[in-house]
Image (cartoon, grey):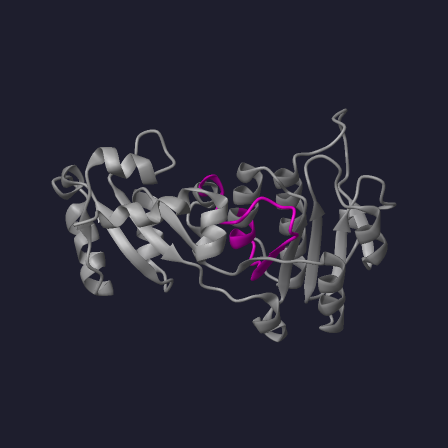
Amino acid sequence: MTESWRKYLPLTKKKGRSEARKFIVEGLRLCREALLSDWKIEAAYVTEEFQRGDHWNEFEEYFRQRGLSYRTIGKQNLRKLADTTTPQGILLIMEEKYPDLERVNLGNKKFILVLQSVRDPGNLGTLVRTADWFGVDLILLSDDCVEPFNPKVIRATMGSIFHFPVLEINHLQERLKILKKNRFFTLGASLHARKTLNQIRLQKPVALVLGGEAQGLSIEIEKQLDLLVRIWKFGQAESLNVAVAGGIFMNHIANQIFNRKRD
């Protein structure tokens, strides 16, 4: 009988994930988050060593609660599907959950993050994780961003990828028009903006728009936004990493639009 895991080998490549709209999740933390989420899991693979380990009872119960059967796989074969050098013995095949933007209800969204040309997987994953912390309920990625289901992105999200939609979109300028029609205030980050972040006051709904590591936002996108702002500077660095800058922006915006007192 043909080994079932082989049909998932295309998912180790971007093209295969895109065509199948499926992706691979591996490791204890991410598999735990996936099993506790409401995302659909097509298949689960575990090694014999994992079944003899300290975490097996926990994950066997997750499988039981989900009504999900698992398959035993050899360590060498697991490595062919896994992206990490030393896999932890558990791997899931997941189906993408969210539809395209046209089928997303923007009326119940209060805080959206829009990213243009963010190509580093670690930066994107960190931005997803940070957005989850600060109450962002939708992330939109321009078509030249790194894909959200890249395994390095997924690992960097630390499971936050399963908490809200992260959508790839075409024609970013047209999508921003849709956000404006839905009464989103579009705020862009720019090093040459006149106003600094601490000078503005915001109300929901807000769409924060960040540019990529190399060039920032394009001129065409900047012209389309309601306001450009920059982060106050006290030292000599020319710029901030996009994930760091995004965290500063999201913290400031969340404190204003959600009207929560700091602990």
Residue at image coords 69%, 60%: 207
**For residue 248, side relative to residue 41 (left or right):** right
**What stretch of residues is rendered in magenta?**
130-153
Question: Which residue is more in the foreground, 171 or 141?
Answer: 171
The image shows residue 136 at horizontal and vertical percentages of 58, 58
The image shows residue 227 at horizontal and vertical percentages of 82, 55
Residue at image coords 64%, 55%: 113
**For residue 162, side relative to residue 3 (left or right):** right
Residue 246 against residue 224 in the figure, above or below = above
Res 192 quadrant in image: top right
Res 254 quadrant in image: bottom right
Tell me if residue 143 is in the magenta stretch: yes
Tell me if residue 175 is in the magenta stretch: no
**For residue 149, side relative to residue 44 (left or right):** right
Residue at image coords 15%, 37%: 49
Residue 43 against residue 102 in the figure, above or below = above
